[in-house]
Image: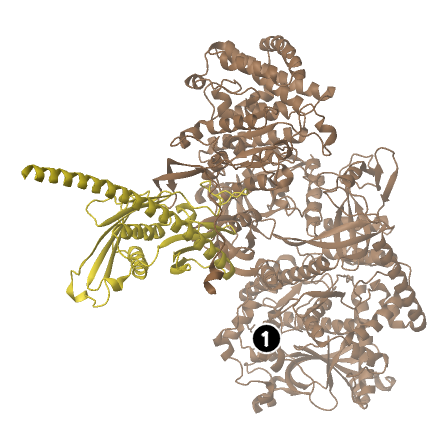
Amino acid sequence: MVRTSRQGPELPPAGWLERRVHHTFRFRKRSRTVADTGEEAYLRVDIPCGCGTVCAACPPTLPALTLASIGGGSCSSAESGPRQAHLLLPDAAALRDCLEVLELPEVQNVVLLTSEVRQLADGGGMRRSARLRALFSDRRRHNVLFDNLHNRETAPAAGAAAAERRAGLALLTAAEWYHEHLGRRFPIVVVSDALAAQFGVPSAAPGSAQQAPQQQQAAGQQAAAEADDAELEALLHQMDMSSIAGSGASGGSGTVMDGTAGGWGGGGGGGGASSGAAAQDDAIAGLLDSLGIGDEPVAGAAQQAQQALQAQQAQQAQQQAQPLPVAASYAPLDLEPGVHILSTAAYWGGVWGHVPAVADVFDSVQQSKAQEAHQGGGSGSGGGGFRPHLSHAAMEAGLASGALLAGTLSVSRRVPGEAIVAVGGGRQLLISGRPALNRAIHGDRVAIRLLPQEQWRHAAELAAPAAGDGEAAVAADGAAEAADGEDEPRDAVARMLAAAAADELQPTAEVVGILQRWSGEIVACISEDDERALASKQASDRQESVLCIPTDRRLPKLRLRSRQLHRLLGQRLVLRLDGWDQGSHYPHGHLVRVLGPINSLRSETDGVLVSSGVHWQPFSEGALRELPPVASSAQYVIPPAELAARCDLRGPDYLVCSIDPPGCTDVDDALSVRWLDHTSGSSGGSGGGGSSTGRQLVEVGVHIADVSYFVRQGGLLDSEAAARCTTVYLVDRRLDMLPALLSEDLCSLRGGQDRYAVSVLWTLDADTFEVQDVWFGRTLIRSRYQLEYSQAQDILDGHPPKPGHEVAAADRPALQRNLELLAALAEHRRRLRIEAGAVELESAELRFNTDAVGQPTTVTVKQEIAMMKIVAEMMILANAAVGQRIYTAFPRAALLRRHPPPRREAFTEVAALCESLGRPLDLEGSPAALAASLAAAAAAAPPAVASLIKSLATRAMSEAEYFCTGDVTGLRGGGGLSHFGLALPFYTHFTSPIRRYADVVVHRQLLAAVAAGPGLAEAAAGLLQLAALPAPQPPLPGADVSSKAAVMNERHRTAKRAQKDCSDLYLLLLLHAQPHVEAATVYGLRRQSLLVFLPKYHLKGVIHLTDKQGVCRPPLEQGAEDDAADPFELAHRRGLAVVAEGLEGSAEGQQPSQLAIVEASSGRQLASIRPMQRMWVRLSADGSRVHGPALRMRLLADSHPEAQAAAQKEAADAAAAGASGAAQATAAGAAAAGCGALPRPGAARPAYRPPGIGAAAGARAARLELRAAAGAPGRARTEACGAAASALSEQIEALQQAVLG
Amino acid sequence: MEYVSPEGLRLDGRRPKELRQLKAELGVLASADGSAMFEMGNTKVLAAVFGPKPIENRSQEDEKRCLVKCEYAMASFSTGERRRRGKGDRRATEITKAIRNCLEQTILVELMPRSQIDVYVQVLQADGGTRCACINAAFMALAAAAVPMRDILASCAAGYLESTALLDLNYVEDSGGGPDVAVAIHPNYQDRVVLLQQDNRVAIETFEEVMQLAVAGCRAVGEFMRQQLLEHTQKLAAARAAGEQQAAAAQEDDDALDEDDY
């Protein structure tokens, strides 16, 4: 039974008829030896010619040539333009050099011969063979691969394969066979420079078939211009010929045959050469006929091409009276008439000269080749052709003498071939092009030399987007259309710089050496071409090299060599750059590790971490050993010494509670309010005597987790925390700064647990909030309640608690009273700061709900609750107080945080916007005046625009930073210490030691200060065991603090970048899965594009009204979709034009007043776009394999169903909000009016509140809904908690959003 | 380079299910009891058989069966790069054992107790599929030596490249990195599998396909060898008939002489 099943099908009878063996050689790469081999060839007659219906003899094949008879009106029947009615047989060299041309869709009916393809593949790389394969496997191209080596009629004679191949005879044999096979009805064109030279078609310089192509082309282009006397002669000659050609047109290829025969038969002498030329002309004429070109203008063009060619040929014919040596050595072949041999230049120039697409590509191919040859000759190394770098000594000498400049290279995201180097004094130098970049990559510190002024670029040139830039097009990988927000400032800067320069010139420079290579890790993946090529190969252990494309567009492609490339297919890789040889096009790198499959969430998030430079390893054992030896706080017993040393605030009159986002586990701050007796108030105010009738004093406390007690300075745990510097919150995970035992348990100020804290206690007047006394010190607290924001807000407002949010009835009135006091205090403080010039800034904090596998399902924007502002204000209060305290104690070593005032130039964009609103900014006055004018403008604008103003202002701000006071005091005076955004003279970070290292350092400084400082007599015994010194000794010397501050700033930046990138990634993934339609406001116009702002996500973007080919993209109408392949749609769009109005003045940087899309034929205006117009935009993301998802924005016409749906939804929401708002508008809601429209959480596709609806009501409604959302599944909540906690910190200082380049 | 063109032709012009050209010649060495030259395309193998003969080493004597000894070697000129290959390297040992194993299953060893058969296989030219060619050559040589055997022993390999099952891989295809399944069968004995070796891993479904193709190839090879043996036998028969005639004529002459004598 088993055996019968094994009886497989019998073999078909062998189809080959004859076997030939050729003795050849094979070069073995690995051993670098040449080995003899016997190559078998089994010859057959069943190889189809692939000519489709034309050939009755052969079975039809799938990619088939589409030949139609020459005169048979092939054009009329063809739908897509003229089809060539001749067969094209390129030789290996033509295949190699003109691959780009052959890849054009216009070029069809190419017969690729196995002999030529194999010859090419033997010497070429994988990538080229993959492209070649695409040429004949894509059936739309109507090209075929013909196995002439195994067709009995065309196969080389036994033992002669190699020789014949070399001589190109195989090609000719095949050409003749085709001609014969197709009944001599179709002209066959052999395109080969070598053959053309051999057979006396004198389009090449004598005896230089190898160098021919570029010279030819150059000559061909210049021929018309150069023509002198020869031209006349050529013209005369042509007159002769054209009469022949004229008769040839009617009689098919008959006359061509004559010419050709004359060419072969003519033998030696100049006459032979020139008649050869004539033959070629005739061939072209015949072919043009075969293309079905009857129109006058085209014929004219063809004639021109002919003229040019002839002029050139005649010239050469004159120059060379000798017959070509190569031709002489070969007996003239008895070529079939109708088989033409043309050189590449003659074929593409002559036959295709009238098709601009083909001619252009051929020209550019020729030029790049010529350039390559030129450069190769120059550097002598071929390949990359870079100039050598200067030696280190030379660079240093140059830098010292000022001949060279040094700076860090930053490559443009949009045009990877351009980079900017900032060289002190605000000057930025442009470095343009690969040769000038000279192997420097983004982030390198380079030595540059200024180029002479003639090579400086015009500002106008610079401002124009480099649409035609080949390099940009290649590297863009199809995603350059929707630029992300990052692009904008750079462009703006470049424009500004250009405008600022008096002579309107942008200085350019070139890199002469690399001082220090950027040493980061590169996230990349194997390029698609290589991947395809690899996938089509079998796995082998050979070492091969592939090109890897980094996710970051600014980095160059890298060459990676590996034996295990098959393992790396479809994976995200981490690479490290090894170097860049002078002779190579690309740098080479090595594999560091594999992150995982492309497009998997885990690996992409890892990629974000790697590329933003966040390193995270588990805690070391030594560090963990420094933790208290307990598993949880339940086992931790407070040592009696500590109990005695600390101020015990666990008493019943201390109503301590924490207020945090839902699900928060690392609680690092708690608040308390203690109402002091009247007596103490009156005793304190005894100076006032009896007049102070019951001045109510109150003690407000901010209690911060005492992390520095557990993390001792100089220990391993301390150094681990210092290395991490901050906890990084990503959407799907949290990278802790401290081990979980500390961050979530021992330090976390949980409700009902005894915890160590460092407290700030203010004694205040309950009515005037006048500070009577401040106390700092270590305490022991027990938080009574761990409240959530909404819970606290409910208590404050006197609303009934939601389920799970109950507090003891007895405490409720006390809590409410305390919260009311805190609210009033916070409002008071905030008002003070705003009067002093604090800026209110805004940015969207997105929160994602994820499904079981971690894919984002919905996105909500973080909700503003009044309680958050109250808590934030209290934290600011504490930070400011601590900042002042440590600065007075250690004026030369305190760790503070400052925020320099913004540069005025950064405000041009905002200023223009406010100007257009009629509320010009005060850019000249004090920072406070600027802040005030900004606030006024925002208040006057509709909500969407207001949030745009705030968002732009946020970006215009400088970046806040940690610093050591010792570095600044002497230099810049007191102004250098202050915090501009918060309008505070001293500020530091004190309130989040669990997740920020700076706070831990500040804690130590504070405790050292209070231990030594005055006014602590009552608590001195209970604080540090430091001896009370007359001059306080800082726990860390100033130099250490300043180096730590530098690290903190760096880590802070990377963490922020990682968080933002991660959030962006999730947003894009979400948009990829479910495109959203959102309202956007146009805030700027360019000639071809508009800048829009989406208030919902605080997203700014550019929408181009033209695509990369310059074809107009009107707002999407109903039923229409972008489909580049649809010829009808394309034709429609081609008829449209973008008209920018209001650009009469020639000043650069001027904005058009209106953009209109106009139908060119009728002048009908389809759409017009003005600044501040509200538009519907469809947001989606498309997954570029290499660079990850990229944002796509598409304008929708108002009539588009999706836009209408969104508008309806918006109207419904607005109505609902209006109804609820009218009923319950409160003072708190009114206070929130300034924060503009609040989006609705929880909805899959939230719509935006239109301007004009009461914002107060909006805030109210939003708050109601947040309550509803609080009941969301627990998992999502814990997921979101991390982000929320980080959001809080942002809220606290409201400025860290500022300016991240 | 691709191994199968879109049109379905392999590098050497065969279709995926075509064998290379087979050639066999029997009795090429006069000194051997039986010898054969077997060619599969460019792969050329010479086999010589000595025996059955009395056993040389008495300690190896078997009361019940004959001893089959096998020796495989590659000529140093058999590959493109000239390299001296010993008989003792791992690959040679493995192939030796594979050949001997096949032959032991094919020869009716029980018929010739206490005797020994020596088989020498020499690869003259290697171009993929040497293992199979060796087995085929050895079988032909045994047949030429008139060693009693169960059935024809036919061997052929198949591989899998670019999602296509390919029959009878040549060297270039063999080094393409795909699986290579070498099979030997007894075609008249219900395709009993005598040898099955495989390099590289392959999916089970693919393996079925490749295996069936290899078996089909074996049958074709077996049929070819049968034809060759038939021809050879006919030639021998013809030669013998001619010889007998001659002998008869000579006898007659002798008789005549005798007659003359007498």
Q: How many marks?
A: 1
Chain coloured yellow: which letter?
B
Quick one: A605 or A32, which is closer to the camera? A32
Q: Which residue was labeled with disc 1? A: A1004
Q: Quadrant of the C terminus of chain A?
A: bottom right
Quick one: B140 or A1194, which is closer to the camera? B140
Disc 1, SS: helix
Position in image of residue B89 (x %, y %): 27, 55
Res A736 → quadrant = bottom right
Position of residue A431 relative to residue A843, above or below, is: above
Position in image of residue B154 (x %, y %): 37, 53
What residue sits 67% from the left and 58% below the top?
A: A959
Chain coloured brown: which letter?
A
Res B41 → quadrant = top left
Position in image of residue A337 (x %, y %): 56, 19
Looking at the image, can residue A899 be seen?
no
